[in-house]
Image: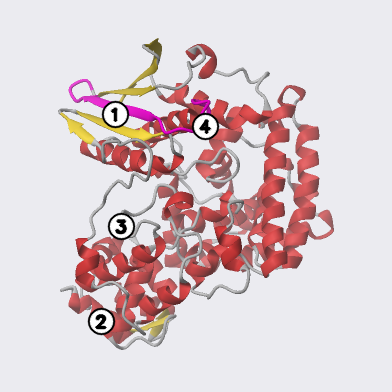
């Protein structure tokens, strides 16, 4: 099996897709703790998922989505190999999962849901899926059913996943029974939550803002409830998507909120100093569609192609688009002053019940935003410290290092992640190294927050990063006054045979830290924990 760093989808074939997507987790015999975690970290679903994203894994999904846009689905999947059982499974994964990452925060993330749900239901008729697919593959056959805003399909999804859960536990090797119980029951919980939402509201309320549909009775209460499912926070609306649509509607010639005319796009390009006649102009989208107006979602997908990236960025820099994007962010983000995007934690940064009416007014240009453009432009990012002891605001840069002092509050993870991202950019970390460093710091921070203290008071956590540019070596130090840690050998390398269900997520996260760094050291000094990590960084 290829390493995480070198894996590529090199050819348009079902086996290449399955190798890329499933990795080492191909059958029940492969259902180990490590394989489940590695998979869920890439897929960003399930109990082992984290907020950060593997950039290489995302890039490959984007490339496939871009090519599907250029060719159309019929032509892209025209080879008979996609009609074989393995081809069908691979095609279902591509259509259902890839857009969710490539077009996160837009209606394009859900554009194939009707198609994939129909294909999934066909595969399940008369239990036909048992003929061609093993228990791991069946998971991805059933997944589109859970995405459907259709109660009948949700009922089928619940029935299928309940049986899948039993089969997974039964087929897993005896020494992996516990981990597969944890995984299967966590998935069942999420499937039940999907079905409950459909039973109550006949749709998923967390998608309302992206679909620009007003909240109905009971939905705002569901969205602000403290027990709202974690999976419903994965698709906060993308400000660029709505800002560009708003600009096109304002500039004249647009035909409503869903379709864009040639004249509207021409006017916006000219406003950005771009020629509609240029060879690299996105005006060819009208020829691609064969009409003089196109759905905005199709145009947006077209603008995101690599050949139009320059145009996309020029349009985003238009003053009117910047103002609209900031206005959208002000509506979406809880802290209206800090307009940093994307948020590191949608659960703690994004308004749970976004004002859809206000969003639609911005997009349609029906009325002015509550904030002026100058007010929005003057808003500066700040660290909001509510309560507790006084802490330094924001990161402090010292020489070739970075020092952060934050609270034992999961809400401060956003500040940590943003500062680490900036640090990685400053020293040109390769995407994979940046991803790994971010994940390591996130895991350690969350472990301290959740397990480091036996009181409810506010405590200081200090995170230091030092970069030796000559040797390309990163030193990470985490200092806190929490409870004394277990020995490093047991904390970062939990035994796969003795780990308990309630510690699965934390134990696995710290174990992953061990795999990503070169050295870990720990000492207890004057009532404080000093954790030091070292990692070589590529060029």
Pick whichever of labels 3 and 1 is earlier in the sequence. Answer: 3
Q: In the image, is residue 519 above or below residue 450?
A: above
Query: Residue reaching furthest right?
Result: 126
Going from N to C along the chain, the mark reached first, 4 or 2, is: 2
**Relative image position of residue 395 (x, y in whole percent):** 25, 37
Tag 2 and tag 3, C-beta contact below 8 Å: no
Looking at the image, residue 105 sits to the left or right of residue 262; the answer is right
Question: How far apart, in angstroms, are the residues tagged by discs 4 and 1?
Answer: 32 Å
Label 3: how many Cα within 10 Å (few below 14, some 14–19, many 20+)? many
Give the spatial CA distance, label 3 vs label 4.
Answer: 28 Å
* Picture quadrant where residue 434 is located: top left
Location of the C terminus (image quadrant) = top left
* Marks 4 and 1, the one that precedes in the sequence: 4
Report the residue at 36% width, 40% height from top.
417
Earlier along the polypeptide chain: callout 2 or callout 3? 2
Secondary structure of the residue carrying tag 3 is: loop
**Label 2, label 3: how far apart the Cα atoms are:** 29 Å
Which SS class for mark 2? helix
Which residue is under mark 4? 450
Which circle, 4 or 1, is nearer the viewer? 4
Instruction: Report, in whole angstroms, how far the alpha carbon at label 4 lies from the one at label 2.
Output: 53 Å
Q: Position of residue 502 (x, y in %)?
A: 65, 30
Q: Which mark is residue 339?
A: 3
Report x, y in % for residue 425. Answer: 25, 40
Q: Which residues are magenta?
A: 450-471
Which numbered circle lies on residue 538?
1
- Inter-mark Cα distance, 3 to 1: 31 Å
Q: Mark 3 or mark 4: which is in front?
A: 4
Residue 168 found in image quarter: top right
């Amino acid at each position: 099996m290829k390493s995480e760093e070198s894996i590529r989808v090199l050819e348009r074939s079902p086996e290449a897709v399955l190798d890329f997507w499933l990795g080492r987790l191909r059958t029940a015999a492969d259902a180990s703790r490590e394989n489940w975690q590695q998979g869920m970290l890439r897929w960003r679903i399930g109990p082992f998922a984290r907020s950060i994203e593997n950039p290489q894994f995302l890039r490959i999904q984007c490339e496939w989505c871009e090519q599907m846009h250029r060719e159309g689905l019929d032509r892209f999947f025209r080879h008979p190999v996609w009609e074989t059982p393995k081809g069908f499974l691979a095609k279902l994964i591509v259509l259902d999962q890839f857009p969710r990452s490539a077009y996160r925060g837009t209606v394009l993330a859900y554009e194939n849901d009707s198609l994939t749900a129909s294909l999934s239901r066909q595969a399940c008729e008369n239990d036909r899926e048992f003929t061609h697919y093993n228990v791991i593959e069946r998971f991805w056959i059933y997944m589109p059913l859970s995405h459907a805003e259709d109660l009948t399909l949700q009922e089928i999804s619940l029935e299928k996943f309940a049986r899948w859960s039993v089969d997974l536990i039964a087929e897993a090797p005896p020494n992996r029974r516990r981990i597969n119980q944890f995984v299967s029951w966590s998935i069942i919980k999420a499937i039940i939550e999907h079905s409950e939402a459909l039973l109550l509201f006949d749709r998923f309320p967390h998608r309302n803002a992206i679909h620009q549909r007003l909240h109905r009775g009971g939905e705002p209460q569901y969205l602000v409830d403290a027990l709202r499912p974690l999976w419903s926070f994965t698709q906060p609306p993308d400000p660029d998507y709505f800002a560009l649509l708003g600009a096109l509607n304002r500039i004249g010639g647009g035909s409503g909120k869903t379709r864009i005319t040639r004249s509207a796009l021409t006017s916006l390009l000219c406003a950005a100093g771009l020629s509609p006649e240029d060879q690299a102009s996105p005006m060819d989208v009208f020829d691609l569609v064969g009409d003089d107006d196109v759905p905005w979602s199709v145009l947006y997908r077209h603008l995101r192609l690599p050949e139009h990236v320059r145009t996309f960025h020029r349009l985003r820099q238009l003053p009117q688009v910047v103002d609209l994007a900031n206005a959208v962010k002000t509506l979406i983000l809880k802290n209206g002053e800090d307009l940093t995007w994307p948020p590191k934690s949608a659960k703690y940064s994004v308004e749970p019940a976004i004002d859809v009416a206000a969003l639609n007014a911005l997009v349609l240009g029906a009325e002015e935003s509550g904030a002026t453009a100058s007010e929005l432009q003057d808003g500066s990012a700040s660290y909001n410290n509510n309560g507790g002891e006084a802490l330094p605001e924001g990161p402090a840069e010292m020489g070739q290092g970075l020092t952060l002092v934050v609270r034992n509050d999961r809400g401060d993870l956003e500040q940590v992640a943003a500062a680490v991202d900036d640090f990685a950019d400053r020293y040109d970390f390769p995407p994979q190294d940046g991803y790994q460093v971010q994940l390591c710091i996130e895991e350690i921070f969350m472990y301290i927050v959740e397990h480091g203290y036996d009181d409810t008071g506010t405590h200081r956590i200090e995170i230091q990063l030092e970069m030796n540019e000559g040797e390309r070596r990163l030193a990470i130090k985490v200092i806190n006054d929490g409870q004394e840690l277990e020995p490093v050998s047991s904390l970062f390398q939990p035994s796969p045979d003795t780990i308990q269900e309630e510690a699965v997520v934390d134990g696995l996260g710290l174990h992953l830290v061990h795999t990503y760094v070169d050295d870990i050291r720990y000492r207890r000094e004057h009532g404080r924990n000093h954790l030091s990590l070292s990692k070589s960084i590529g060029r």
